[in-house]
Image (tube, rainbow, N blue to C red):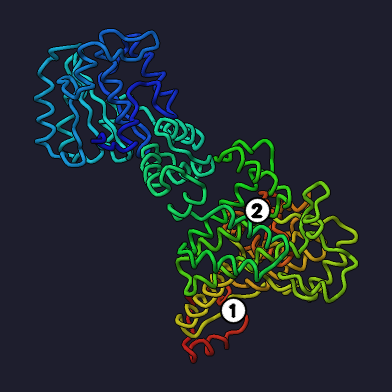
Amino acid sequence: MSENYIVSARKYRPASFATVVGQQSLTHTLKTAIGSNKLAHAYLFCGPRGVGKTTCARIFAKAINCEHLTADGEPCNECESCKAFNEQRSYNIIELDAASNNSVDDIRTIVDQVRIPPQVGKYRVFIIDEVHMLTTAAFNAFLKTLEEPPEYAIFILATTEKQKIIPTILSRCQIYDFARIKVPDIVEQLKYICTDRGVTAETAALNVIAQKADGAMRDALSIFDQVAASCEGNITYQGAIENLNVLDHDYYFRLDKAFLKSDIPEALLIYKDIREHGFDSQFFINGLAQHFRDLMVASNPQTVVLLEMNDELAQKFVLQAQKFAPAYFYRVMDLCNYCDLNYRNASNKQFLVELTLIKICQLLTGPMPPAGGDQPSVKKMQTSPAQTPQQTTQAPRTAAPQAAASAQHTASAPAQHYMPQGHPLPAPPVPSNKPSAATPSKMPPRIYINNTQRAAEEAAKQEATKKEASAPTFYDNKPIDPEQFAQAWNAYTQAHPHDIIVVNAMHRAVPMLVSGTHYKMKSANEGEAGMINNSLTDILTYLRNTLQNGTITLEIELDKTIKTPKIMTEREIVNDILSRRPEFGDFIKDFQLTLK
């Protein structure tokens, strides 16, 4: 009769500090505390699930009662205390699962047991797992005992949610934060288990299991057992991704080829294949963002170490990253992020993802910065001045006049870098080259027949602004001509005539260029400067959209030497009109006009 099967998570559970995976700094600290006999009366082990909190608590409890510690601070497994612990008959170690025993009565039981001194060994250790599940009353009942326990009592609390523990408990404990286990560490442990169990496995397959575990060793062992049973002792990469329903890296590398060729049909067909395999579209778009994040990291030798994958796959990412310009990664991640933010509210989610893939395919047809080196893909990113009109009109984000202006500009200026904007901003109309009309004089406030009309106009204005802010666009960062900037500046004042203080200040002081695209505007007093700062976001958005340059910045400088005309209130303006034209009072009275 064959021996009973034991799952890997139990069979390979660490029995010593040396066998704990990925927590070397913590285990070293605990061994040092035991060796120097500087033990606290209460510890809090916190961190994600499956990283070894409870396991380390048990090893720690075993070690402090060991009669013959080894030279490196490990329990000997030979003394009576160690044997009792290994055979699960030790009365010096009491465990409580607070997830199911979280009442005041359960804590009182623990408090009663604290009064009993150890019969064998020096300490009685109380391990309370998932301590954050205790009720507030149970925490309060535990406070006094936790603060002043007998000298032989040590408490070890373990939790995955430290923020749920009341501060009075935290202040009484030494806190140890357990980290997520790194992918390479999990892979090495899985290789050891494969050797011990006589299972053959491809490194790429073990890497998939480690990434799926998300830093939890226990999860990795459970997934390993599942895949090993499915693959019948020979774990292959293909078998692992099929068994775990993982979206393979090959899908994303195939998409890379489609993006490099600007092949929209191929990209959409790959997305269709992904959907037919049962993958969620939002999961796919997040995976695509992660893929380009990894490519961005792999493109720089200094950041390659941030890749959490095996060396073979990391080298594949390094080679693939050389085919793209660095700014391309930012643009793709920006588009993926925008798609993810709007996915839940989209009425047609499939269309949203397909539209994102189309935009990514078209990125290389517009002007992009060179990536360095002689790379064919980079050459496609630059707009040639010899392009035909038919080729120019194929640029996906630019209208015909803009494309012609871009082609004319390219011959004399280097390609501009795309700036990742976080949340895309609205696309403005192209500023006209015609000289603007003379700046209008300061407009008096409007007089409304009733307040309902004014409220309706304000609501319509806010709704229009909200719709503009939700439409995606990207800046070309074109050079700014002083005349164009002045036109855009005046156009903003014409579009916002009711912001009297801000508009007056803008008419009085056009910003001066300090350096690059950084402008400085002087303000007469603190109140006026505050009003301008309140509208600064709207002003910058308008200027950036109108001038198609996302690098414009504006600084407000206080200059009290500036003399400003008196700003009249609406009531003062009406009284001034009445003093000069008394008959205007009859007009107001007849039409029942009011000021809000």
Instruction: Establish if 387 lies above or below 136.
Output: below
Q: Position of residue 224 (x, y in %)?
A: 40, 42
First-in-chain label (2 vs 1): 2
Query: Disc number at residue 579?
Result: 1
- For mark 2, give the secondary structure: helix
Query: Disc number at residue 561?
Result: none
The residue located at (68%, 51%) in the rendering is 555
The front one of 570 and 353 is 353
Q: Amino acid at mark 1?
A: Ser
Structural distance between the alpha carbons of marks 2 and 1: 62 Å
Instruction: Establish if 462 lies above or below 566.
Output: below
The residue located at (43%, 37%) in the rendering is 199
Residue 438 visible in the picture = no
Horizontal placement of 499 versus 367: left or right?
Answer: left
The residue located at (56%, 51%) in the rendering is 290
Q: 10 Å neighbourhood of mark 1: few (<14), some, or many (≥20)?
A: few
The quadrant in which the N terminus is found is: top left
Q: Amino acid at mark 2?
A: Tyr
Q: Position of residue 588 (x, y in %)?
A: 51, 86
Horizontal placement of 199 versus 288: left or right?
Answer: left
Residue 190 visible in the picture = yes
Query: Disc number at residue 330?
Result: 2
Q: Position of residue 438 (x, y in %)?
A: 78, 74
Instruction: Establish if 424 lies above or below 21.
Output: below
The residue located at (52%, 79%) in the rendering is 457
Q: Position of residue 423 (x, y in %)?
A: 58, 59
